[in-house]
Image (cartoon, rainbow, N blue to C red):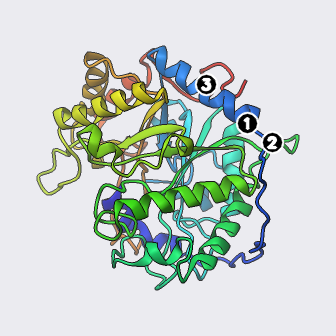
Amino acid sequence: MKTILFLLIAIGMVGCDSDDSGNDNQTPDPNPIENPQKSKLLSNLQQIQNSSKILIGHQGTNIAGVGWRLNNFPNGDKSDFKDVSGKTPAVFGWEIAPNNESFNTTFDGITFDETMRLAIKAYENNAVNTFSMHPYRLDNNQNSWNTTPGYVTKILPNGAMHNQYKAWLDKLIIHFKKLKNSKGEAIPFIFRPYHEMDGGWFWWGTTACTDAEYIDLFRFTIDYMRNNGLNNMLVCYSPGYETTEVGYLKRYPGDKYVDILGIDAYHLSADPNSNNGANWNYNLQKLNVLKQVGLSKNKPIAWAETGQQNLTSNNYFTELTQFITTNNIQLSYMMFWANYTATVSNGGGEGFYVPYQSLNNTTLKNDFINFTNQPNYIFQNSQEAIYK
């Protein structure tokens, strides 16, 4: 979510010791062994979608909320989503924004180790983990919203900074390899890199690199991560604003590189001061394109980011359910964006995409509770074992 993420970017600069322990010269595995739980997860996502049920997720649900952060509830049991509904999301969204100075700190201001610990806990409770990222540039250490052209060519093969990019990936791979169950087995996760590539606000977007350069970046990144042992990784491709199949696929890296097809699409806020989101008809165009591409490629589809900023419509969740039901929208999962608390870095503001406990709006809370009571929505531990 570009607007809120920009407000929050300084949170990821919370001081932590850097972790430069990665081996920058890992030897790729030419024949990586397939992870059986990953294959089962992918199959189950498709089955859930075909059954007209939907896994419901929330970004950073136990990392931060309105008025609190993880350091106040280190066990990871606090969640605005859970406080209001009594249910825990079935999909946990995590954010990483590694930079050159402190690779060990996530976008949400917690360490990678803490992120992986919480992700393992979610897995043990039968939930799905999905990771997105807003990485800093290696050429100027500016954040993802620095769109000066030329950086992508520098980190591609034969580029001046290609070796630095591989070293950067090595560090990321080491952290993802910490995702193991009690038996020491690698646990599946969804990786959604370089999302909203059809917009012009990121250094991997349309104003900063060509379609061909983006595709090369995506392919190299996934090949490198898979060849260096991440056989437990599912990959999600997720544009943001395209309403045609041609537009959706213009930066598509190929079926070999993508397991899940996604879309980032928010609903227009009733607040006249907000330009964040689109109306239902516009979102329907995007989801119909997603459906058609999913059918043609036989891949599960996901509403990878959604919500209404600060929930200015008291019946938003009722409208959402009606929208899904009326239009026969079938998804593997749908994830609401994050709730966050006031900090100096975001100007003292608070934001939310699901209601929170102290919110003085009973109507909205009840609308959300009714949403979570719909029989076709799946929450943590309310579905069969998703990895078996």
Residue 124: mark in rendering: 1
Number of marks in picture: 3
Q: Position of residue 371 (x, y in %)?
A: 38, 25
User: Is the residue 330 above or below the residue 232 in the image?
Assistant: above
Q: Nearer the viewer, mark 2 or mark 3?
A: 3
Is the Cβ of the residue at disc 1 closer than 8 Å to that at disc 3?
Answer: no
- The local crowd at label 1, few if under 14, some if 14 to 19, many if 20 or more residues have their Cα within 10 Å, is some
Q: Which amino acid does label 1 sit on?
A: Glu
- Mark 3 or mark 1, which is nearer the start of the sequence? 3
Q: Which amino acid does label 2 sit on?
A: Asn
Q: Which residue lies furthest to the right in this view?
A: 183
User: Is the residue 201 above or below the residue 259 in the image?
Assistant: below
Whether residue 314 appears in this view of the structure is no
Q: Which residue is drawn at 75% across and 37% down?
A: 35
Q: How far apart are marks 1 and 3 (CA)?
A: 19 Å
Q: Position of residue 262 (x, y in %)?
A: 42, 40
Residue 43: mark in rendering: 3
Q: Is mark 3 on a helix, strand or loop?
A: helix
Residue 181: mark in rendering: 2
Q: Where is residue 197 in the image (x, y as percent from the top left)?
A: 36, 56
Q: Which of 90 and 292 lies nearest the eye of the viewer?
A: 292
- Could you tell me which quadrant the C terminus lies in? top right
Q: Residue at x 40, y 27 (%)?
A: 296
Q: Which of 191 and 298 lies nearest the eye of the viewer?
A: 298
Q: Would residue 165 be found to the left or right of residue 36 on screen?
A: left
Q: How far apart are marks 2 and 1 (CA)?
A: 8 Å
Q: Distance between the residues labelled 2 and 3?
A: 20 Å
Q: Which of 47 and 204 lies nearest the eye of the viewer?
A: 204
Q: Residue at x 66, y 63 (%)?
A: 112
- Could you tell me which quadrant the N terminus lies in? bottom left
Q: Which residue is drawn at 18% across and 37% down?
A: 282
Q: Which of 189 and 39 lies nearest the eye of the viewer?
A: 39
